[in-house]
Amino acid sequence: MKNRTKVIKLIEENLKTINPDDYPDIKEELLALSEGIKRANQFLETIRGIKALIPETLQELNIKTDEGFRKELNYGKIEVDELLGNEDEDFDKLLAFDLALQKYTLNKAGLFSKERKEISLVVKRSEDLIKSKDELFELIINKMMPAINQHINLIQLKKGNISALKEITSVPILLDKNEKCYIKVDGVELYEDVAVRDTIGGISGFSFRITKGVSYRIGGFKAKGESHMGKRLIDKGTFYVTNKRYIYDGSAKNIDSELGDIISVEAYSDGIKISRANKRDEVYAGNANWEYVGTIISGIVKNVK
């Protein structure tokens, strides 16, 4: 990843504007991110120290020419000069060169045969730096930041701020002028509330005994009905949310509704329930972060109203 130093600095600046106590749901994650940034800065300080020591070490070894680099270190002088002068540090190459230089220095000093323990500690330090670099930046940039950003976006969305939403530019549905699509979920099942009537049977009347083990009942069979609300699968298709509408594109049924017509939205772990005036409640289920979808809908509705 390029510009990792700049990314860390940007994250650090953004964190200064956030008070973890204002976000109790993600306070621990924010504090962990701050600790990660602190470790990243310590790593970057180590890198800067390494870069500062390399020229001094090369001067002591008196390796000046390009031929000398290639022969003794298997590096070109121009390559090393570019590595040291590059503000956007290539950490892998820099640490690999530092490791090669330390091994060469120890070997030239005759320590490979005399002080194995010291050599292994020096080499291990460089190897640990390379490993910690990978773990640290993977944790901060690729894992923690996306999660934190999503939480912060959710908080902003709940307030009706949709500026942080990312537009999906390639969708098969026709959008109006200035309409932007923010959600697209494939393989969504559509359910509708329906009244289900259950029949419960019973026998009425009275009976009298004719003989042992034989009785006769006067009367007949009566049945009564009980109703309750249930869910009926209607269709399977794709669910969209734009800054104006929510759209369901199914194989048998299509729904196209203005977001302003929504009365309520209830999000669950496996689906979302949308209520509109004078319409049956709709339940959409599928593989998606429905809490996020519901928050986006609510945020856009607040923004529209």
Image (spheres, rainbow, N blue to C red):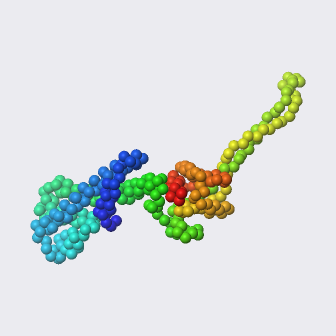
Q: Is residue 196 above or below residue 71?
A: above
Where does the C terminus fall, quadrant-wise? Answer: bottom right
Q: Position of residue 19 (x, y in %)?
A: 35, 50
**In which quadrant of the rendered view does residue 208 lie?**
top right
- Front one among 218 and 281: 281
Q: Which residue lies at the image location 24% right of the left edge and 70% below the top edge?
A: 86
**Pick the front one: 230 or 15:** 15
What x and y, as percent, mark residue 91?
27, 64
> Residue at the location (69% across, 43% down)?
228
Side (left or right) of 94 relative to 191: left
Measured as percent of width and height from the top left, residue 289 is found at 51, 54
From this view, report whether residue 219 is shown above or below residue 5: above
> Which residue is outermost to the front?
305
Q: Quadrant of residue 235?
A: bottom right
In which quadrant of the rendered image does the N terminus lie? bottom left
Does residue 159 show up?
Answer: yes
Q: Residue at x 59, y 60 (%)?
A: 258
Residue 174 appears at what percent x and percent y?
58, 69
Q: Residue at 16% across / 60% down in the picture?
A: 112
Residue 61 lies left or right of residue 180; in this view the side is left
